[in-house]
Protein backbone atom coordinates (compact mmCIF):
# COMPACT_ATOMS: atom_id res chain seq x y z
CA UNK A 1 0.00 0.00 0.00
CA UNK A 2 1.34 3.40 -0.97
CA UNK A 3 1.11 5.90 1.83
CA UNK A 4 1.86 9.56 2.08
CA UNK A 5 3.77 11.04 4.96
CA UNK A 6 1.43 12.99 7.19
CA UNK A 7 2.40 16.64 7.48
CA UNK A 8 0.73 17.25 10.83
CA UNK A 9 1.84 15.47 13.97
CA UNK A 10 1.69 18.35 16.44
CA UNK A 11 -1.58 18.45 18.36
CA UNK A 12 -2.90 21.79 19.60
CA UNK A 13 -4.76 21.73 22.90
CA UNK A 14 -7.86 23.89 22.79
CA UNK A 15 -7.99 26.21 25.80
CA UNK A 16 -10.83 28.58 25.15
CA UNK A 17 -14.07 28.89 23.26
CA UNK A 18 -14.00 32.54 22.30
CA UNK A 19 -13.31 33.98 18.86
CA UNK A 20 -12.50 37.44 20.11
CA UNK A 21 -12.16 39.16 16.72
CA UNK A 22 -15.71 38.26 15.76
CA UNK A 23 -18.92 39.29 17.43
CA UNK A 24 -20.51 35.83 17.42
CA UNK A 25 -22.35 34.58 20.47
CA UNK A 26 -24.50 31.53 21.24
CA UNK A 27 -28.23 32.07 21.02
CA UNK A 28 -30.26 31.53 24.14
CA UNK A 29 -33.06 29.46 22.59
CA UNK A 30 -32.08 26.57 24.82
CA UNK A 31 -28.72 25.83 26.34
CA UNK A 32 -28.43 22.10 26.96
CA UNK A 33 -24.71 22.42 27.67
CA UNK A 34 -22.53 24.75 29.70
CA UNK A 35 -20.41 26.32 26.97
CA UNK A 36 -18.21 28.57 29.09
CA UNK A 37 -15.49 26.02 29.83
CA UNK A 38 -14.26 22.53 29.14
CA UNK A 39 -14.55 19.72 31.67
CA UNK A 40 -11.25 18.50 33.09
CA UNK A 41 -12.08 16.44 36.19
CA UNK A 42 -9.60 13.56 36.16
CA UNK A 43 -8.51 12.72 39.71
CA UNK A 44 -11.75 11.10 40.92
CA UNK A 45 -11.80 8.71 37.98
CA UNK A 46 -8.11 7.89 38.27
CA UNK A 47 -8.85 6.88 41.87
CA UNK A 48 -11.85 4.88 40.65
CA UNK A 49 -9.85 2.82 38.13
CA UNK A 50 -9.50 -0.20 40.48
CA UNK A 51 -13.30 -0.23 40.91
CA UNK A 52 -13.73 0.02 37.14
CA UNK A 53 -11.42 -2.95 36.65
CA UNK A 54 -13.37 -5.01 39.18
CA UNK A 55 -16.53 -4.29 37.19
CA UNK A 56 -14.74 -5.08 33.92
CA UNK A 57 -13.54 -8.47 35.24
CA UNK A 58 -16.98 -9.26 36.65
CA UNK A 59 -18.72 -8.46 33.34
CA UNK A 60 -16.09 -10.37 31.34
CA UNK A 61 -16.62 -13.43 33.55
CA UNK A 62 -20.39 -13.10 33.40
CA UNK A 63 -20.39 -12.85 29.61
CA UNK A 64 -17.94 -15.73 29.30
CA UNK A 65 -20.02 -18.03 31.50
CA UNK A 66 -23.24 -17.19 29.66
CA UNK A 67 -21.55 -17.80 26.32
CA UNK A 68 -20.17 -21.16 27.53
CA UNK A 69 -23.62 -22.18 28.73
CA UNK A 70 -25.13 -20.92 25.44
CA UNK A 71 -27.36 -18.48 27.28
CA UNK A 72 -28.48 -15.17 25.77
CA UNK A 73 -26.76 -11.95 26.77
CA UNK A 74 -27.89 -10.63 30.13
CA UNK A 75 -30.14 -7.58 30.02
CA UNK A 76 -27.99 -5.92 32.68
CA UNK A 77 -24.20 -5.94 32.61
CA UNK A 78 -23.77 -4.53 36.11
CA UNK A 79 -26.15 -3.45 38.83
CA UNK A 80 -23.74 -0.56 39.48
CA UNK A 81 -23.88 0.78 35.95
CA UNK A 82 -26.97 -0.04 33.92
CA UNK A 83 -28.93 -1.86 36.62
CA UNK A 84 -30.15 1.05 38.75
CA UNK A 85 -30.10 4.06 36.41
CA UNK A 86 -32.48 4.04 33.40
CA UNK A 87 -30.45 6.72 31.57
CA UNK A 88 -27.24 4.68 31.86
CA UNK A 89 -29.20 1.68 30.58
CA UNK A 90 -30.13 3.78 27.54
CA UNK A 91 -26.45 4.54 26.97
CA UNK A 92 -25.59 0.83 27.01
CA UNK A 93 -28.54 -0.12 24.82
CA UNK A 94 -27.79 2.72 22.39
CA UNK A 95 -24.00 2.36 22.47
CA UNK A 96 -22.30 3.75 19.35
CA UNK A 97 -25.51 5.53 18.33
CA UNK A 98 -26.91 9.04 18.52
CA UNK A 99 -29.18 7.93 21.37
CA UNK A 100 -26.25 7.26 23.69
CA UNK A 101 -24.56 10.53 22.75
CA UNK A 102 -27.78 12.44 23.35
CA UNK A 103 -27.89 11.09 26.90
CA UNK A 104 -24.24 12.06 27.48
CA UNK A 105 -24.58 15.53 25.97
CA UNK A 106 -27.69 16.43 27.92
CA UNK A 107 -27.39 14.76 31.32
CA UNK A 108 -28.35 17.14 34.12
CA UNK A 109 -26.13 16.73 37.15
CA UNK A 110 -27.37 16.94 40.75
CA UNK A 111 -31.04 16.73 39.79
CA UNK A 112 -31.97 13.80 42.03
CA UNK A 113 -31.06 12.17 45.33
CA UNK A 114 -31.78 8.49 44.69
CA UNK A 115 -29.07 5.88 44.23
CA UNK A 116 -29.77 5.70 40.49
CA UNK A 117 -29.44 9.48 40.21
CA UNK A 118 -26.10 9.46 42.03
CA UNK A 119 -24.82 6.60 39.88
CA UNK A 120 -25.87 8.65 36.86
CA UNK A 121 -23.96 11.67 38.15
CA UNK A 122 -20.88 9.52 38.71
CA UNK A 123 -20.81 7.63 35.41
CA UNK A 124 -21.93 10.55 33.26
CA UNK A 125 -19.00 12.38 34.81
CA UNK A 126 -16.39 9.78 33.83
CA UNK A 127 -13.47 11.02 31.78
CA UNK A 128 -14.81 9.62 28.49
CA UNK A 129 -18.18 11.32 29.02
CA UNK A 130 -16.49 14.61 29.88
CA UNK A 131 -14.36 14.28 26.77
CA UNK A 132 -17.40 13.65 24.55
CA UNK A 133 -18.98 16.86 25.84
CA UNK A 134 -15.67 18.64 25.33
CA UNK A 135 -15.62 17.33 21.76
CA UNK A 136 -19.10 18.77 21.28
CA UNK A 137 -17.85 22.21 22.31
CA UNK A 138 -14.66 21.92 20.27
CA UNK A 139 -16.63 20.87 17.19
CA UNK A 140 -18.81 23.95 17.54
CA UNK A 141 -15.75 26.16 17.92
CA UNK A 142 -13.98 24.79 14.85
CA UNK A 143 -17.06 24.61 12.62
CA UNK A 144 -17.84 28.18 13.69
CA UNK A 145 -14.36 29.24 12.55
CA UNK A 146 -14.89 27.49 9.21
CA UNK A 147 -18.26 29.22 8.74
CA UNK A 148 -16.70 32.60 9.46
CA UNK A 149 -13.90 31.85 6.97
CA UNK A 150 -16.56 31.09 4.34
CA UNK A 151 -18.64 34.14 5.20
CA UNK A 152 -17.85 35.84 1.90
CA UNK A 153 -20.40 33.52 0.34
CA UNK A 154 -24.05 34.52 0.22
CA UNK A 155 -24.90 31.23 1.91
CA UNK A 156 -22.65 28.83 3.81
CA UNK A 157 -23.61 25.19 3.28
CA UNK A 158 -22.54 22.36 5.60
CA UNK A 159 -22.75 18.68 4.74
CA UNK A 160 -22.85 16.61 7.93
CA UNK A 161 -22.00 12.95 7.33
CA UNK A 162 -23.20 10.30 9.81
CA UNK A 163 -24.79 13.29 11.51
CA UNK A 164 -26.67 11.56 14.34
CA UNK A 165 -28.88 14.13 16.03
CA UNK A 166 -26.73 16.96 14.56
CA UNK A 167 -27.23 18.96 17.75
CA UNK A 168 -23.99 20.94 17.41
CA UNK A 169 -24.68 21.87 13.77
CA UNK A 170 -28.29 22.85 14.47
CA UNK A 171 -27.22 25.05 17.39
CA UNK A 172 -24.67 26.77 15.14
CA UNK A 173 -27.23 27.38 12.40
CA UNK A 174 -29.53 28.99 14.99
CA UNK A 175 -26.62 31.05 16.30
CA UNK A 176 -25.75 32.46 12.88
CA UNK A 177 -29.40 32.98 12.01
CA UNK A 178 -29.72 35.23 15.05
CA UNK A 179 -26.83 37.28 13.63
CA UNK A 180 -28.41 37.58 10.20
CA UNK A 181 -26.11 35.09 8.46
CA UNK A 182 -27.53 32.34 6.28
CA UNK A 183 -26.10 28.93 7.12
CA UNK A 184 -27.80 25.77 5.96
CA UNK A 185 -27.02 22.07 6.34
CA UNK A 186 -27.61 18.78 4.63
CA UNK A 187 -27.80 16.07 7.30
CA UNK A 188 -26.95 12.56 6.10
CA UNK A 189 -27.36 9.43 8.19
CA UNK A 190 -28.44 5.86 7.55
CA UNK A 191 -30.47 5.83 10.79
CA UNK A 192 -33.85 7.40 10.10
CA UNK A 193 -34.54 7.82 13.84
CA UNK A 194 -31.50 10.11 14.06
CA UNK A 195 -32.79 12.24 11.20
CA UNK A 196 -36.26 12.36 12.75
CA UNK A 197 -34.81 13.59 16.03
CA UNK A 198 -32.63 16.14 14.21
CA UNK A 199 -35.75 17.55 12.58
CA UNK A 200 -37.38 17.85 16.01
CA UNK A 201 -34.31 19.77 17.26
CA UNK A 202 -34.31 21.99 14.18
CA UNK A 203 -37.94 22.88 14.80
CA UNK A 204 -37.17 23.60 18.47
CA UNK A 205 -34.39 25.97 17.44
CA UNK A 206 -36.43 27.60 14.69
CA UNK A 207 -34.23 26.49 11.79
CA UNK A 208 -36.32 23.81 10.10
CA UNK A 209 -36.19 25.79 6.86
CA UNK A 210 -32.38 25.63 6.87
CA UNK A 211 -31.81 21.89 7.07
CA UNK A 212 -32.40 19.02 4.69
CA UNK A 213 -32.09 15.35 5.60
CA UNK A 214 -30.93 12.37 3.57
CA UNK A 215 -31.34 8.79 4.73
CA UNK A 216 -28.28 7.18 3.14
CA UNK A 217 -24.86 5.70 3.76
CA UNK A 218 -21.85 8.02 3.89
CA UNK A 219 -20.56 6.43 0.68
CA UNK A 220 -23.27 8.38 -1.12
CA UNK A 221 -21.27 11.51 -0.37
CA UNK A 222 -20.22 12.09 -3.99
CA UNK A 223 -23.75 12.33 -5.36
CA UNK A 224 -25.10 14.30 -2.40
CA UNK A 225 -22.22 16.81 -2.42
CA UNK A 226 -22.48 17.40 -6.17
CA UNK A 227 -26.12 18.40 -5.69
CA UNK A 228 -25.81 20.34 -2.42
CA UNK A 229 -22.38 21.94 -3.13
CA UNK A 230 -21.19 22.36 0.48
CA UNK A 231 -18.27 24.58 1.44
CA UNK A 232 -17.86 22.60 4.68
CA UNK A 233 -18.03 18.83 5.11
CA UNK A 234 -17.87 17.39 8.61
CA UNK A 235 -17.76 13.75 9.65
CA UNK A 236 -17.32 13.68 13.39
CA UNK A 237 -17.39 10.38 15.24
CA UNK A 238 -17.54 7.92 12.35
CA UNK A 239 -13.79 7.26 12.16
CA UNK A 240 -14.06 5.62 15.59
CA UNK A 241 -15.68 2.66 13.82
CA UNK A 242 -14.01 2.53 10.39
CA UNK A 243 -10.95 0.35 9.67
CA UNK A 244 -7.99 2.08 8.04
CA UNK A 245 -8.64 1.15 4.36
CA UNK A 246 -12.33 2.09 4.57
CA UNK A 247 -11.53 5.38 6.28
CA UNK A 248 -8.97 6.35 3.62
CA UNK A 249 -11.35 5.38 0.80
CA UNK A 250 -14.16 7.48 2.26
CA UNK A 251 -11.97 10.52 2.90
CA UNK A 252 -10.67 10.25 -0.69
CA UNK A 253 -14.26 10.56 -1.91
CA UNK A 254 -14.77 13.60 0.34
CA UNK A 255 -11.56 15.19 -0.93
CA UNK A 256 -12.71 14.78 -4.54
CA UNK A 257 -16.04 16.57 -4.04
CA UNK A 258 -14.95 19.30 -1.61
CA UNK A 259 -14.41 22.59 -3.51
CA UNK A 260 -11.07 24.43 -3.36
CA UNK A 261 -10.75 26.41 -0.12
CA UNK A 262 -13.53 24.28 1.37
CA UNK A 263 -13.16 22.82 4.87
CA UNK A 264 -13.20 19.21 6.03
CA UNK A 265 -13.42 18.27 9.71
CA UNK A 266 -13.24 14.83 11.25
CA UNK A 267 -12.07 13.27 14.51
CA UNK A 268 -11.01 10.07 16.27
CA UNK A 269 -10.88 8.84 19.83
CA UNK A 270 -7.43 8.20 21.34
CA UNK A 271 -6.29 5.33 23.57
CA UNK A 272 -7.24 5.95 27.20
CA UNK A 273 -7.50 4.28 30.60
CA UNK A 274 -11.28 3.78 30.39
CA UNK A 275 -11.50 2.14 26.97
CA UNK A 276 -11.83 -1.40 28.37
CA UNK A 277 -14.69 -0.24 30.60
CA UNK A 278 -16.46 1.13 27.53
CA UNK A 279 -15.96 -2.13 25.64
CA UNK A 280 -17.06 -4.58 28.33
CA UNK A 281 -19.42 -2.76 30.69
CA UNK A 282 -21.05 -0.36 28.21
CA UNK A 283 -20.82 -2.64 25.12
CA UNK A 284 -19.16 0.20 23.21
CA UNK A 285 -16.06 -1.00 21.32
CA UNK A 286 -14.23 1.54 19.15
CA UNK A 287 -11.09 1.83 17.05
CA UNK A 288 -8.60 3.84 19.08
CA UNK A 289 -5.85 5.68 17.22
CA UNK A 290 -2.90 7.93 17.92
CA UNK A 291 -2.83 11.46 16.50
CA UNK A 292 -0.17 10.26 14.05
CA UNK A 293 -2.49 7.47 12.84
CA UNK A 294 -5.29 9.94 12.32
CA UNK A 295 -3.08 12.42 10.47
CA UNK A 296 -1.92 9.64 8.14
CA UNK A 297 -5.51 8.60 7.36
CA UNK A 298 -6.51 12.16 6.43
CA UNK A 299 -3.28 12.71 4.51
CA UNK A 300 -3.60 9.43 2.60
CA UNK A 301 -7.15 10.46 1.78
CA UNK A 302 -5.65 13.27 -0.30
CA UNK A 303 -5.55 16.25 2.06
CA UNK A 304 -2.47 18.34 2.86
CA UNK A 305 -1.64 20.61 5.79
CA UNK A 306 -3.79 18.80 8.35
CA UNK A 307 -4.26 20.67 11.61
CA UNK A 308 -4.88 18.56 14.71
CA UNK A 309 -6.64 19.99 17.76
CA UNK A 310 -7.47 18.15 20.99
CA UNK A 311 -9.87 18.98 23.75
CA UNK A 312 -8.01 19.37 27.09
CA UNK A 313 -8.51 15.76 28.27
CA UNK A 314 -6.74 14.58 25.08
CA UNK A 315 -9.18 11.75 24.37
CA UNK A 316 -10.68 13.23 21.20
CA UNK A 317 -8.59 14.85 18.48
CA UNK A 318 -10.08 16.83 15.61
CA UNK A 319 -8.48 17.04 12.19
CA UNK A 320 -9.27 20.28 10.36
CA UNK A 321 -8.10 20.93 6.83
CA UNK A 322 -8.81 23.54 4.19
CA UNK A 323 -8.52 22.14 0.69
CA UNK A 324 -5.83 23.79 -1.35
CA UNK A 325 -6.74 25.85 -4.39
CA UNK A 326 -4.84 24.02 -7.12
CA UNK A 327 -5.48 26.88 -9.57
CA UNK A 328 -3.37 29.26 -7.50
CA UNK A 329 0.35 29.09 -8.30
Image: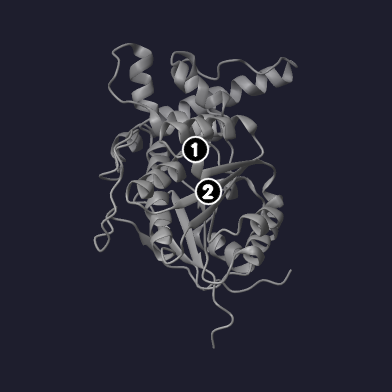
User: In the rendered picture of this protein, how many numbered marks are placed on residues?
Assistant: 2
Residue sitting at x 75%, y 17%: 70
- Residue 43: where, in percent of width, then height? 29, 39
**Is 255 left or right of 236, judged from the image as shown?**
right
- Whole-angstrom CA distance, mark 1 to mark 2, is 10 Å
Residue sitting at x 58%, y 63%: 298
Q: Which mark is residue 185?
A: 2
Residue 135 visible in this rendered orientation of the protein: no
- Residue 186: where, in percent of width, then height? 57, 47
Where on the picture, by quarter, is residue 146? bottom left
Q: Residues within 10 Å of mark 2 (few under 14, many from 20)?
A: many
User: Nearest the camera: 226 or 72?
Assistant: 226
- Farthest bottom residue in view: 329
**Is 239 left or right of 223, judged from the image as shown?**
left
Q: Residues within 10 Å of mark 1 (few under 14, many from 20)?
A: some
Q: Which of the two discs, 1 and 2, labels the residue nearer the N terminus? A: 2
Residue sitting at x 46%, y 56%: 318
Where on the picture, by quarter, is residue 207? top left
Against 258, is 106 above or below? above
Circle 1 sits on which residue?
208
Against 14, is 79 above or below? above
Against 284, is 36 above or below? below
- Residue 202: where, in percent of width, then height? 47, 36
Secondary structure beneath dot 2 equals strand
Please say which color scheme the image uses.
one colour
Task: Report the mark closest to the observer, 1 or 2.
Answer: 1
- Residue 290: where, in percent of width, then height? 51, 57
Secondary structure beneath dot 1 equals helix
Quadrant the C terminus occupies? bottom right
User: Nearest the camera: 239 or 64?
Assistant: 239
Amino acid sequence: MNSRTATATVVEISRGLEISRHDISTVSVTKPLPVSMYETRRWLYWLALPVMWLLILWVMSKKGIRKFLKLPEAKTNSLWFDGLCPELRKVKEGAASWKALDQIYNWRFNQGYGLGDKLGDFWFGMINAQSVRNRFKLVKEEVRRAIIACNGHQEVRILSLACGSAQAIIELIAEFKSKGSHVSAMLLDQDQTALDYAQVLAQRYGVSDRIQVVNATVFRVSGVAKTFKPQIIEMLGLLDYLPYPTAVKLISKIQEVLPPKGFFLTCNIMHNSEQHFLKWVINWPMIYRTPQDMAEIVSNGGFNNVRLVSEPLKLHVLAIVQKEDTHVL
